[in-house]
Image (cartoon, rainbow, N blue to C red):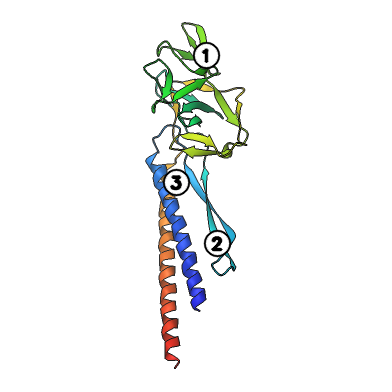
Amino acid sequence: MFIQDRLGMIEGTETMLAQERRLDQIANNLANVNTAGFKKEDVTFWEMMFKTADNRERVGKGLQVITDLKQGGAEQTGSPLDFAINGPGFFKIQTPSGVRYTRDGNFTLNSQGQLSTADGNLVLGDGGAVTLPNQHVQVGRDGQITADGKPIGRLDIVTFVDPQGLEKEGNSLFRPKDATVAEQPLEAPNVQQGFLEGSNVNTVAELTEMIDVQRAYQSQQKAIQTTDELDQQSTSRVGKLT
């Protein structure tokens, strides 16, 4: 009885910790509902075998983070330095930690006239950093940049065979999980100038799931309390056998 009760408490505690992790993710999704290019996160659970302290195997719960890369809606801003990718693809960004990828096309010009993100990271084109003479430029759907009717470069837009090979860095940047995840040029990009891709978070769905997770958490609390009461009763009865 004691061993069974103890295992029940361990299982309940593991489940509560997983639900806490999910609640944190839902809160982060809701906090970024208005963040351009934001991709919501979800979790998946699976069972796994592992060794206990006395080398016996038992089934436990695993948790894996999944990023939903579904495209968000395009919102017109009218700014010539805002860009949205319709369909697959990522903008390439040069950061101090290396090249990163993003769907957030909310760009600006730095003091050197280079196209950059709000964090100051450079946006990459086919020849490296993109330098613009001013904000009055035209960008075609293929990413071609022109000023005064003359081509001055092209936005470097890439894709991946398996985008799930990317992991999030911050709220809008992505990086490969390992060296086997390689970029490849996007043959026919569809860029919209003056638009931004919105977050793909569905507020109603997230709030509904938050309620479900909170209820599941409370159920596990009650289960642990019941198991603890059973443990106390069994201990008390064993003590009265003499």
Q: Real-space Cα distance between discs 2 and 3?
A: 28 Å
Using the image, determine if residue 69 lies above or below residue 54.
above
- Location of mark 3 (residue): 205
The image quadrant that residue 127 belongs to is top right
Q: Residue 192: which disc?
A: none
In this view, the residue in front, 133 or 186, is 133
Q: Earlier in the sequence, mark 1 or mark 2?
A: 2
Using the image, determine if residue 50 lies above or below residue 27.
below
| Residue 182 makes an appearance in the image | yes
Q: Residue at x 43, y 47 (%)?
A: 25
Q: Residue 153: which disc?
A: 1
Q: Real-space Cα distance between discs 3 and 1?
A: 41 Å
Q: Is label 3 in a helix, a strand or a loop? A: helix
* Quadrant of the drawing holding the C terminus: bottom left
Q: How dense is the environment of label 3, judged by Cα within 10 Å: few (below 14), some, or many (20 and up)?
A: few
Kindly check if marks 1 and 2 are in contact, taking CB atoms under 8 A apart as contact: no
Amino acid type assigned to the residue bearing label 1 in the image: Gly
| Residue 70 makes an appearance in the image | no
Q: Real-space Cα distance between discs 1 and 2?
A: 54 Å
Query: x and y percent of residue 33 in the render?
Result: 40, 38
- Location of mark 2 (residue): 60
Query: x and y percent of residue 21 in the render?
Result: 44, 52
Amino acid type assigned to the residue bearing label 3 in the image: Ala
Q: Earlier in the sequence, mark 2 or mark 3?
A: 2
Q: Earlier in the sequence, mark 3 or mark 1?
A: 1
In this view, the residue in front, 56 or 38, is 56
